[in-house]
Image (cartoon, rainbow, N blue to C red):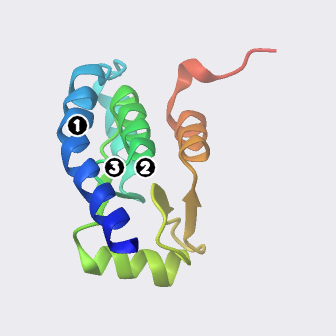
Amino acid sequence: MRLFIRLFFRLLRLILTPFMLIGEWLTTPKAIARDAEQQRNVDENCQQLALYQFSSCPFCIKVRKEIARLGLNIERRDAQHNQQYRLELAQAGGKVKVPCLRISTPGQTTTWLYESQDIISYLQRQFDSSAAVVK
């Protein structure tokens, strides 16, 4: 019975994955506009970041859409199909759960940020000047 359930969900995933990826492609927003100097600074800051993800995970899609909206060049690491990235995620991050944003700050410890909404909030605080709250 357990094998049947596992095969059923694997088949369901195989059927739904193309639709999810096409939906992501169709609904990904355009990047916010920055001048060349601002974009260079953003790109420099993004070199400290890496997103561990699965291609068809709905929460990963949500984070990738926000990354696209913010115009960020963050390295994407496929922890589903690359065993090295999966191992890094398990050993250094503590668990194989995606999405996970690795934040490496020179001279400090590496932070592993899980939960899509926490990752989106972090990226907005760091890179979205229009998200600043005016009091």
Q: Is residue 1 above or below residue 53?
A: below
- Residue that numbered label 1 is attached to: 21
Q: Distance between the residues labelled 1 and 3?
A: 19 Å
Identify the amino acid type marked 2: Asn
Tally the numbered discs.
3
Mark 2 secondary-structure assignment: helix
- Residue that numbered label 3 is attached to: 74
Residue 90 position in % (x across, y down): 46, 79
* Nearer to me, 100 or 38: 100
Q: Which mark is residue 45?
A: 2
Q: How far apart are marks 2 and 1 (CA)?
A: 28 Å
Q: Earlier in the sequence, mark 2 or mark 1?
A: 1
Residue 76 position in % (x across, y down): 29, 55
What's the residue at 56%, 78% (across, down)? Answer: 94
Residue 45 position in % (x across, y down): 43, 49
Query: Label 3 crowding class (10 Å Cα cut-off): few <14, some 14-19, many 20+?
Result: some
Depth-wise, is mark 1 or mark 3 nearer the camera? 1
Depth-wise, is mark 2 or mark 1 nearer the camera? 1
Q: Earlier in the sequence, mark 2 or mark 3?
A: 2
Mark 1 secondary-structure assignment: helix
Query: Label 1 crowding class (10 Å Cα cut-off): few <14, some 14-19, many 20+?
Result: some
Identify the amino acid type marked 3: Ile
Q: In this view, does 30 lie to the left or right of 105?
A: left
Depth-wise, is mark 2 or mark 3 nearer the camera? 3
Identify the amino acid type marked 1: Leu
Q: In which quarter of the image is residue 51?
A: bottom left
